[in-house]
Amino acid sequence: MIPASVLDNKTVLVTGSAGFLAKVFVEKVLRIQPDVKKLYLLMRAPDSHSAAKRLRDEVMEKELFRVVKEKWGPNFAKFVSEKVVAVAGDISREDLGIEDVDLKKEIWKETDLVVNFAATTRFDERYDVALATNTYGAAHVLNFSKKCARIKLLVHVSTAYVCGEEAGIIKEKPVSMAKGGNHDDDDDDELIVKIVDGERKLVQQRLLQLQSNKQLSSDGGDRGISSAMRLLGLERYIYIFWNIWYSNDYKFIVVYF
């Protein structure tokens, strides 16, 4: 996806860092490109202490990192402390939910590349959560990347199932922000914006209905609302999937700045 030489002395912001694909990416970078300058790993956590704990327990302590640990031996912890920074945040919020102002400014100043792995892949996820993470989250990552003074590249890794009926080798189609986003799918873009705006309004209306429904609240409370929002997600998935488009694999979107 990204040649090792590209990461030499570069600073990379990685989102969804505790996820399956992100861990594989981080391990490979540390293993084959130890000269990477810094990896900022965004972890969904309320504070830096919790983020650091997640980094240790859910990433670095995994068997996946055995080869890197063997390579560095007793110096592994020092190597990681020099290269990796756990960042508390949440892509469903503006500025990725990073509350540490100084750290946020540091990331904006130092980051050369952003790789977005963050997503929810639960097929029965609450619709409001899925929309906030997989749709608006991607937009928040793009907007955050635009604030990075040294940004050269943004790689967005989709959730599963976005390649339509295409088969065989599907080449990445880089988008150049310097050229205003050079692609030929303006009609599709307008359709997507229209769909997303409609779904956002639908979610807001349904949440208001559920929260004001006294019968539902007395019977199930928050659990009842969660169940209803999961059901809404399945309903909208089936509608959009079968009536607008359908797809079948992971995809990488590369944006050059």
Image: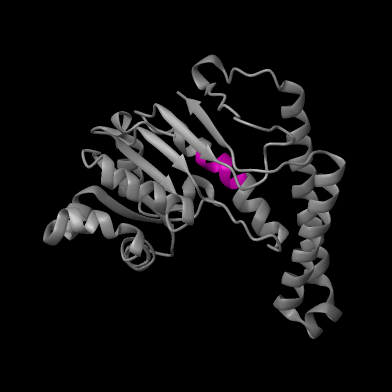
Q: Residue at x 19, y 50 (%)?
A: 82
- Rendered location of residue 165, percent (x, y): 74, 35
- Helix, strand or loop for the magenta stretch, by majority: helix
* Left or right: 145 in relation to 72: right
**Quadrant (top left, top right, bottom left, bottom right) of the C terminus:** top left
Q: Is residue 78 visible?
A: no
Number of labelled discs?
Answer: 0
Decide which of 160, 87 is in the foreground and name it.
160
- Rendered location of residue 85, percent (x, y): 29, 52
Q: Residue at x 78, y 36 (%)?
A: 194
Residue furthest front in the image: 168
Residue furthest bottom in the image: 219
Q: Is residue 61 above or below residue 114?
A: below
Span of residues in magenta = 136-141
Q: Residue at x 16, y 54 (%)?
A: 72
Q: Is residue 53 above or below residue 108?
A: below
Q: Indicate yes or no whether the magenta region holds residue 139.
A: yes
Q: Quadrant of residue 18?
A: bottom left
Q: Residue at x 43, y 33 (%)?
A: 147
Q: Quadrant of residue 10?
A: top left
Q: Is residue 140 above or below residue 188?
A: below
Rendering colour mode: one colour
**Quadrant (top left, top right, bottom left, bottom right) of the N terminus:** top left
Q: Indicate yes or no whether the magenta region holds residue 123.
A: no
- Rendered location of residue 46, percent (x, y): 43, 65
* Left or right: 88 in relation to 84: right
- Rendered location of residue 155, percent (x, y): 48, 35
Q: Is residue 216 visible?
A: yes
